[in-house]
């Protein structure tokens, strides 16, 4: 079943075409990687999908319904939640209180929201920090907190924006395993990432943006050998690896 369908979506800022007639589909239960150079339009596309920007053209259907005109909170209520590349927790609040912010979407009672938050915190490996201020977390811990807060909304589809940025190789491997476990829970994922080893390992398919245009979509092995992708982003060194 197609969970997310993007049809000819375009977003411009003045004379700059940030996303140009992009069409993509994500099947329920899959992990779709989204890669491309800095400035390719990846985060802009996330902002359009999640309702932060309205598309200038095209359509976005999620779970069979058009969400192109929805506000961000309406998109989240429908079951599509995103994380952000620059993590900004509520630093003075505890980890559990941060995650409860997401949990309140589907669990309006405080007791229910806290129960859900603590379950998700345990799942992402932050149980020992649950009652500590979020400002005490390391970069890796804050990334896990961002994942927990998004998961607490009980989303069907998660959009992850460079969740491995700033992590050590060991921490990145651990996040890859966590994302795989999230998928095992039946959650579909669209993942922006620059760590090629990670995105090649995680993804069922990979989409490549360059100058706002979709230049390739395919399985990781196909993308790694695509001459357009090698020239635009991966480089010859990657093709010879």
Image (spheres, rainbow, N blue to C red):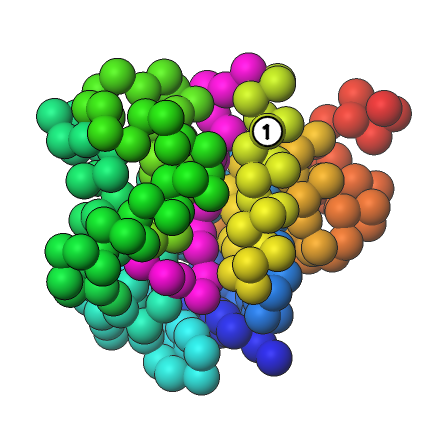
Res. 127 image quadrant: top left
Q: Is residue 179 left or right of residue 202?
A: left
**Quarter of the image where the C terminus is located:** top right
Res. 138 image quadrant: top left
Write the residue at 61% across / 18% down.
170
Is 69 in front, or is 96? 96
Up the image or down, 172 lies above or below 183; here it is above
Residue that numbered label 1 is attached to: 174
Q: Main secondary structure of the magenta part?
A: loop
Write the residue at 30% across / 48% down.
117
Most distant residue in the right direction: 240
Category of crowding for the residue at label 1, using alpha-carbon neighbours closer than 10 angstroms: few (below 14), some (14–19), many (at least 20): some
Q: Is residue 2 magenta?
A: no
Could you tell me residue 71's position as x and y percent?
A: 20, 66
- Is residue 193 visible in the rendered structure shown here? yes
- Is residue 83 visible in the rendered structure shown here? no
Q: Which residues are magenta?
A: 153-168
Could you tell me residue 130's position as x and y percent?
A: 29, 32
Q: Is residue 110 left or right of residue 47?
A: left
Res. 63 image quadrant: bottom left
Could you tell me residue 87's position as x and y percent?
A: 30, 31
Is 192 in front, or is 230? 192
**Quarter of the image where the N terminus is located:** bottom right
Q: Is residue 91 left or right of residue 23?
A: left
Q: Secondary structure at mark 1?
A: helix
Write the residue at 42% across / 40% down.
122
Q: Is residue 42 left or right of residue 194?
A: left
Write the residue at 47% across / 43% down.
123
């Amino acid at each position: 079943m197609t969970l997310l369908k993007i049809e000819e979506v375009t977003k411009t800022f003045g004379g700059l075409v940030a996303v140009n007639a992009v069409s993509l589909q994500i099947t329920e239960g899959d992990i779709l990687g989204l890669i491309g150079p800095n400035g390719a339009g990846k985060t802009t596309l996330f902002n359009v999908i999640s309702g932060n920007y309205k598309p200038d053209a095209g359509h976005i259907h999620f779970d069979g319904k058009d969400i192109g005109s929805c506000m961000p909170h309406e998109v989240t209520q429908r079951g599509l939640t995103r994380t952000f590349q620059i993590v900004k927790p509520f630093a003075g609040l505890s980890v559990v209180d941060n995650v409860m912010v997401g949990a309140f979407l589907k669990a309006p009672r405080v007791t229910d929201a806290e129960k859900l938050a603590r379950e998700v915190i345990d799942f992402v490996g932050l149980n020992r920090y649950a009652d500590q201020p979020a400002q005490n977390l390391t970069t890796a811990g804050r990334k896990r907190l961002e994942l927990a807060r998004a998961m607490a909304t009980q989303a069907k589809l998660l959009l992850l924006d460079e969740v491995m940025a700033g992590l050590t190789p060991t921490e990145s491997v651990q996040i890859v395993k966590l994302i795989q476990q999230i998928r095992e829970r039946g959650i579909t994922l669209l993942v922006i990432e620059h760590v090629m080893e990670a995105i090649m390992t995680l993804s069922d398919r990979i989409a490549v943006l360059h100058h706002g245009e979709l230049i390739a979509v395919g399985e990781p092995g196909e993308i790694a050998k695509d001459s357009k992708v090698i020239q635009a982003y991966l480089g010859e060194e990657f093709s010879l690896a």
